[in-house]
Amino acid sequence: MLVESRAPADPLVLFRRWYREADRKGALQPDAIALATADARGVPSVRMVLFKGLEAGRFLFYSNYESRKGRDLAANNRAALVFYWSLTRHQVRVSGRVSRLSRADSTAYFHSRPRGAQLSALGSRQSRVVPSRTVLERAVAKLDGLYPEIVHRLHDRLLYVRQREDGWRIERLAP
Ligand SMILES: Cc1cc2nc3c(=O)[nH]c(=O)nc-3n(C[C@H](O)[C@H](O)[C@H](O)COP(=O)(O)O)c2cc1C
């Protein structure tokens, strides 16, 4: 039970406590959050991203400015995110305005990532339709200066687009 009299005055204190508890008890990916954005017309979309820490009361995540979420946020900086730790049965919801980190912070994060992830980020125009996996693999392999097999980190994204008649068309999106 969560009672007012015992709840911390600062919600971030409660967040940190619950996050640590989920992590300590072995929650699978306690840092996975669902991030909801909306475009300029208010059309919502939601996806998982990784929570990368709290800084001055701001929840940090990293993504591509040209992705769908990046374009949504450029048009409408209001967003919401949710953590859910089934192990401890806690949910934390956050909403507010999203702002960009400094270029130096983004660069530092990029350099902290494994090489495969860096290549994939550079070779993939996130959320754009691509003709095939091979095209993505070649783009990443070219960056690596190798041919052809460094593509373990390349995720697959298929978008099902409902057809006017019936059935679905499958598009591949850059991860
Ligand atoms: C567990 C998990 C963690 C993810 N973390 C990130 C992340 O930190 N940043 C990111 O850009 N995409 C992340 N993704 C991929 C996104 O869910 C999404 O497919 C991608 O960012 C494109 O989203 P968009 O087209 O809505 O912009 C993650 C996916 C999963 C399943």
Image (spheres, helix red, strand yellow):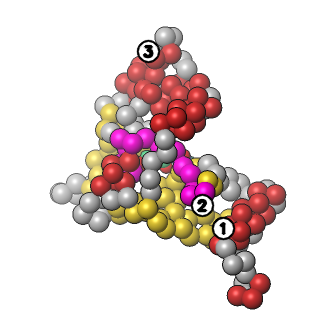
Q: Is residue 2 left or right of residue 132?
A: right
Q: Is residue 2 left or right of residue 120?
A: right
CB-based contact (under 8 Å), mark 1 and mark 2: yes
Calculate the distance from the C-alpha at mark 2 to the C-alpha at mark 3.
40 Å
Q: Which amino acid lies under the numbered mark 3 shown in the image of this protein?
A: Lys
- Residue 149 coordinates in the image, percent (x, y): 54, 18
Q: Is the residue 24 above or below the residue 88 in the image?
A: above
Q: Which amino acid lies under the numbered mark 2 shown in the image of this protein?
A: Gly
Helix, strand or loop status at disc 2: loop
Residue at left offset 58%, top offset 36%: 109
Residue at left offset 31%, top offset 38%: 129
Q: Which corner quadrant of the image does residue 30 belong to? A: bottom right
List the residue tagged with mark 3. Answer: 142
Determine the main secondary structure of the stretch shown in magenta: loop
Q: Which mark is residue 129?
A: none
Say few, some or many: other residues with alpha carbon within 10 Å of mark 3 (under 14 / 14 to 19 / 20 or more).
Answer: some
Q: Which mark is residue 12?
A: 1
Say few, some or many: other residues with alpha carbon within 10 Å of mark 2 (under 14 / 14 to 19 / 20 or more).
Answer: few
- Residue 60 coordinates in the image, percent (x, y): 56, 51
Q: Would you say residue 76 is visible in this rendering?
A: yes
Q: Which corner quadrant of the image does residue 28 belong to? A: bottom right
CB-based contact (under 8 Å), mark 2 and mark 3: no
Calculate the distance from the C-alpha at mark 3 to the C-alpha at mark 1.
44 Å
Q: Which mark is residue 57?
A: 2
Q: Which corner quadrant of the image does residue 13 belong to? A: bottom right
Helix, strand or loop status at disc 1: helix
The earlier-in-sequence mark between 2 and 3 is 2
Residue at left offset 49%, top offset 45%: 101
Q: Which amino acid lies under the numbered mark 1 shown in the image of this protein?
A: Leu
Span of residues in magenta: 56-69
